[in-house]
Image (cartoon, rainbow, N blue to C red):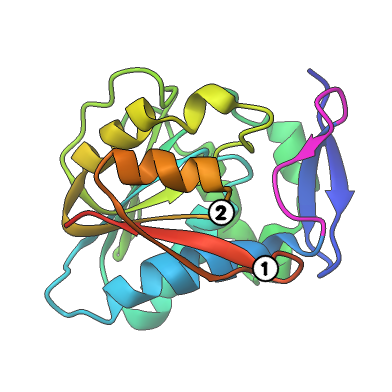
Amino acid sequence: MQREIQLTADGSHTVSIPELKITYHSSHGAIGESRHVFINAGLLPLLNEPSQQPVKIIEIGFGTGLNALLSLQEAIKQQQQIKYIALEISPLLPDEVSFLNHGQLLNMEESFLHLHAAEWEKEMYINEFFTLTKKKLSVLQPILINPVNCIFFDAFAPSVQPDVWTKDVFEKMYALLLPGGTLVTYCSKSEVRRAMQAAGFSVIKIQGPWGKREMVRAMRS
């Protein structure tokens, strides 16, 4: 399917798939949305707990690499270790990555390109605070990794990928989390929350990013 680069309201790029009428990020701001949903609600609470070292994250949907880049930025800023695993079945092509402005806007262009160039299926050293493992794997397939502290659930919306937002998938996510671990996502639809609760999660709605009233934080007990 054809992919196109689009500008969002905060000046950062996203990727759209016109055929499916979807974008990888909010039109209200790609960087703003990612920072609010995944960094502020997911990562920062863990970095503020000294016992959580290193912080282990799995991202469902590597996409443009923006969530990984923002996580790397925080790891450097706070000098704390992060082990980051990302699943993606349809990686962007190098030419597509070259048009994205995330690295430029965050003054991390070299790091942004490094994340995308990192070899797949291996744990790759990015810097002294951050390692990245990219896997060409669907969330519907078996995921054989050690438990993590946080899941960035950044799949396409339920209207596009309904089979990803199910009780079965969230049971798998629950099993991937350490006790007390969290899953954060931009989607707060009632059927999604019910599927999470049926899988065992404690689910709360919190303030969403610009242009979206609510998002979800789900916790494993």
Residue 164 vs residue 130, the one in the foreground = 164
- Residue name at image x 61 percent, y 34 percent: 158
Q: Which residue is mark 2?
A: 188
Q: Position of residue 94 (x, y in %)?
A: 68, 33
Is residue 16 shown above or below 52? above
Which residue type does callout 2 highlight? Ser
Q: Tell me the SS state at disc 2.
A: loop
Place of residue 195 in the rendered image (x, y in percent of width and height, measured from the top left): 41, 38
Sequence order check, earlier mark of 1 and 2: 2
85 or 139, nearer to the observer: 139
Instruction: Tell me, yes or no, whether the highlighted magenta stretch contains residue 24.
Output: yes
Q: Relative to residue 112, is residue 38 drawn left or right? A: left
Point 66% across, 31% down: residue: 92
> Could you tell me residue 56's position as x and y percent?
25, 55
**Kind of element beneath mark 1:** loop
Q: Is residue 174 left or right of residue 96?
A: left
Label 2 CA crowd tier, 10 Å (few <14, some 14–19, many 20+): some
Q: Main secondary structure of the magenta part?
A: loop
Question: Quick check: is 58 in the magenta stretch?
Answer: no
User: In the picture, which quadrant includes the C terminus?
Assistant: bottom left
Q: Residue at x 81, y 38 (%)?
A: 16
Residue 142 in sight from this viewpoint: yes
Cα separation between marks 1 and 2: 9 Å
Is 121 located above or below residue 58 in the figure? above
Circle 1 residues within 10 Å: few <14, some 14–19, many ≥20: few
Tell me where the magenta segment starts and ends, as one range: 18-27
Q: Which quarter of the image is occupied by the N terminus? A: top right
- Give the labeled residue for mark 1: 213
Q: Nearer the viewer, residue 175 or 190?
A: 190
Q: Which mark is residue 10?
A: none
Q: Check if mark 1's residue and mark 2's residue have beta carbons within 8 Å.
A: yes
Q: Nearer the viewer, residue 167 or 74?
A: 167
